[in-house]
Amino acid sequence: MQEERSQDDDQFERWYLRHVSRRNDSLVLHGADLDADLHTTGLSARYLRIRAVGPGEEQQETLAENLLARHPRVLVRGDAGSGKTTLSHVLAVRAAQGELDSGGLHGLVPFLLPLRTIMSKGLPLPAPGQLLSAAQVSLNEGQPAGWEQRVLAAGRGLLLVDGIDEVDADRREAARRWLGELLDAYPDTRCMVTSRPMAIRAAWLEDTGFAEFHLSPMTLDDVRAFIERWHAVPRPFGDDSRDVAAMGEALFVAVAQRPELTRLATNPLMCALLCALHLQTRGKLPRGRVQLYEAALTMLLDRRDRERRVEGPEGVLLGREEQAVMLQHLAYWMHRNGRAEMSREQAVALLEEVLRGMPQVRSRAGAEQSLRHLLNRSGQLREAAAGTVEFAHRAFQDYLAAREAVESRDIGLLIGRAQEDQWEDVIQLAVGVADRRDSEELLLGILRRADREPRYRVRLVLVAGAALEMSTRLDPALRQEIVDRITDLIPPRTREGSAELARAGDLVLQLLPGPQQFRWLSPEARLVVHTAELVGSGSAQTFVQRFTALPVTDPAPDDAWVPDRPVFSLLLTDSRTTGPPSADLPAVAHHTLEFTGTEDARDLSGSADVVRKVICRGDATAPPITALPVDALHGLPLLHTLEVVNHGLLTRLGGLRDLRRLRTLRIRGCPALRDLSDLEHSSVMFLELDRDPGLAVLRGLAAARRLRVLYLPHPTGEFSADSLARHLPGVRIRAGAGFRH
């Protein structure tokens, strides 16, 4: 409708938009012990685009305004620290600055309503004409009478409702009715609502026309860009910009090399905390992971809500240690039982157990109410599927389990599990949180097991070596014994030694010498790189790439040794390269290869040491195949990703169980392939299909013990996400284009 505007309207609106821009263009790290200039920082300078996933849509980079350009009403769910509030502030600032140009968004007037502020003060939910006062906009008494109503009636309103989850549970339904009535009165108003995932039921706003999206973790590329932005902003203490940029690069290397930091950094809040702590300490993170986790837990379990004045929206106030005790109990139970998740009923039963020893909490809240608080407020737990509870961050689960193990004096259990991959981080962190007596008992027990059990010797010695850095106080003789044993293994002296070390996985990357310890790419350095290549993970590739700065030969003639072909192939590899090698690089320099049939597959053997990804693509010029030529693939020890594309007659995969490092499998354009039983004993964790699976395919997938994520284009009907979840317990169903590997 045509808007009637007065000079007073125009003047006030210009003032209001400047006010919104100034007020919201800042990022506050609530709960963190930081210098003043790091605690509050410019949002525009450090904001990074966040990805969001919606039902039936491909994963996409989200400028939030792009969502609103396609969907006038959007509900955005996200875990603690995933960027919901930041997204709201960015949208408000860009609207105020006239930077929303797509999808009819230009000229919108933002109304940012932090519901935690409104509800914590006992204020009524605002009617039109009260939006600015509810949002505590100063000088709102100067607004012309009826201005808000005129803006909304003209369809120029942008309503940003932040934090439905921070409203008391018994008032959320009232908030839903308020929002519905407001949008009924002004149907052309664009609106975004944010919430943590499980605070409100599925399709909570569907009847009012809202499309739902979920914020996704950042990729490693996102993390690099995030860190670069944080270290590109001028600092008030006058550091040289080149020094600050170098600090940022050092932080990214640390994040990429250390899996526990990688997991943390994919969450924007945790990544911001890492950056801020790194800058505040002029390039040094807390002394160890224990201190980092403690700082983060203090922020998430206590100070973040307290500083934001969020007081018990679930009807209970739980202190930091009270929440930690409950979370420790859940985390340790999951580790002892080899579980990645638990039923909601099991979580309630476990909390009943721990509350029997916490009468001061039990008098205020029962197990069900405590679980609801932990799901919605702690940032640690989430409900991955209906009735299923898991930890949002595996890194924190490991840390909390370590605390519980030490407090329970379960040192013997930790020693007995030391060779198991899933206990690796728990044991290291247990050494960090234990007192001197317990940490020495744990490390000495691991070494004695290494002596008694030769098949685990290397693995156990590496576990003890990796844990050594976690202990600040240790008997010098025990410390020296561990150092001596590590020295016998690292650096590797033969290719056979490299292979033995590589079996320990990412753990060995923490102990291998870096490029700073070599003057040139000597035989010793090449064996270090070869060890990392055999590990084959993303962290290993990042480790290898750090060696690119080393010269291939030493300037000194006596040391000028060059092998016939490079064993450091990843140094020369572009992961996007496919097809035949270029004239500038030898064939071994390409770790992604493509072939069309059995004849071409014979050529793979010449690149056995370097290939990490293979594309088997159908070609009209090649004879059709009915079975995958797995014999050629068995000679590729680093094979991580396999794509099978456009083979219309292919009926079986076969032989996948022998591809021990294969993690990702994509199958497209293979309509005859209806039997995936070969996945049963394979190591495939991520599977992408281009169509809904039939029952035969489902039976094969149900037997795939290691499968964790299944991507489908648009799962519907009999093969909807919910239906598939019942057939495939423990497998996450995702809609969209698949993986970014």
Image: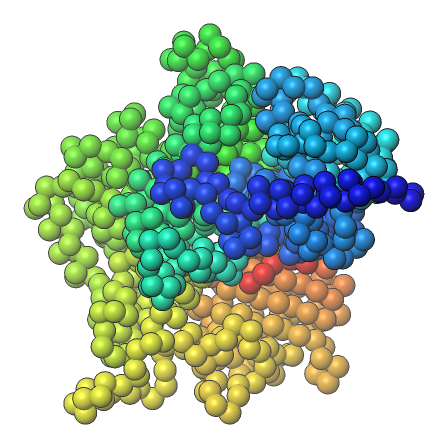
| 30 sits left or right of 189 in the view | left
Residue 96 appears in the rendering: yes
Q: Residue furthest right?
A: 1
Q: Quadrant of residue 192?
A: top right
The image position of residue 445, as x and y in percent, is: 19, 40
Question: In the rendered view of the protein, which quadrant contains the C terminus?
Answer: bottom right
The image position of residue 114, as x and y in percent, is: 62, 32
Q: Residue at x 13, y 56 (%)?
A: 484
| 216 sits left or right of 124 in the view | left
Q: Quadrant of residue 196?
A: top right
Q: Residue at x 62, y 29 (%)?
A: 136
Depth check, front residue: 296 or 450: 296
| 118 sits left or right of 587 in the view | right
Depth check, front residue: 165 or 676: 165
Residue 505 appears in the rendering: no
| 688 sits left or right of 707 in the view | right
Q: Quadrant of residue 558?
A: bottom left
**Residue 620 vertical placement versus 124 (above, below):** below
Q: Residue at x 46, y 36 (%)?
A: 30
**Residue 535 vertical placement versus 383 (above, below):** below
